[in-house]
Image (cartoon, helix red, strand yellow):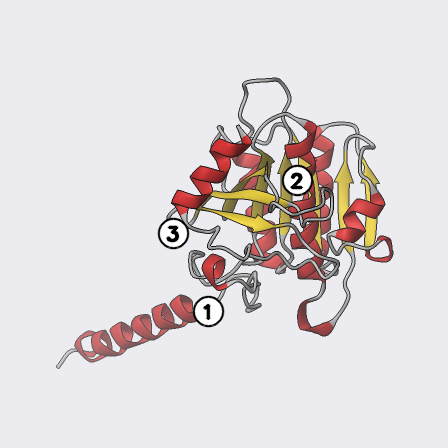
Amino acid sequence: MPPSSLMDPRLAALREEICAIERSAPAGGGRSVLPFGIEAVDARLAGGGLMPALHEAAAASPGPGDDAAATLFLAGLAARFSRREGKLGQVLWAIARRDLFAPGLAQAGLTPDRLLYAECRGDAEVLAVVEEGVRHGALAAVIGEAGRADMAATRRLQLAAEESGTPALLLRRWRKAGADPLAAPSAAMTRWRIACAPSASLPHEGIGRARWHVELARQRGGPPHEWILETPDAEARLALPARSGDRKDQAAGMDRKAA
């Protein structure tokens, strides 16, 4: 029997073994996914949580309320990534304008002692700083704010995040009315659209926990979905309202009330 005939089954078995290892290995250098801790959300995410990859979020409208909601949404995600494995890691935030409110970020779980700022002069510099921070490998997460990020730039961030295991969180800013920041294609693992939603009706105004309409506009390996969620607490934990706000019919009803 020729030697090549003897080797063919061995090569086939080796290829199958390698493929099995690749299928079972998580992204990000073996680091596990980060769950939201909410069954209704984690069950809808491919993998049961967020991979250490590129994730994007944008406000549902150019209004200041929705813009603040999207900012705090990413701040809460970064805070949760910084608490992985029982450690408090550092988060780098690349900004192009000075409009962050430190007490508000702290209320979402991202306290000043864990936050570093990098002031940039435009989208290109923001993206470069985010990529450098992600590739460094010693940060818990890196956040950047950019209005424009083409497919090549987002692919670089996604590859850097996968290789280093450091998540890149990109806040897609509105640049002009009518131009959806998430309209352009992206290599991001997930893309989120965040809007303010009415709080629960209480006897006294101003004491209810704020709510967001959270839309998972796109995810790799899974369908889109949407929920009504209560905003993060000081431990960066989102929550479902007392009623089943994750149901699409109730979410639509809440949206009509907001309109």
Front disc: 2 or 3? 2
The residue wearing badge 1 is 25
Q: Please, is residue 15 above or below residue 134 in the view?
A: below
Looking at the picture, how far across and down is residue 259, in whole percent?
53, 27
Q: Do the residues bearing badges 2 and 1 touch, measured as CB atoms within 8 Å? A: no
Residue 120 lies in quadrant = top right
Q: Is residue 135 visible?
A: no
The residue under label 3 is 222
Label 1 environment density (alpha carbons within 10 Å; few <14, some 14–19, many ≥20): few
Q: Earlier in the sequence, mark 2 or mark 1?
A: 1
Specify the label residue 167 is tagged with. Answer: none
Camera sees residue 203 = yes
Residue 2's place in the image compared with 216, above or below, is below
Q: Which residue is mark 2?
A: 69
Residue 23, given in percent of the width and then of the height, sits at 39, 67
Task: Please state which amino acid type lies under the numbered disc 1.
Answer: Ala
Q: Is residue 54 left or right of residue 96?
A: left
Q: How many marks?
A: 3
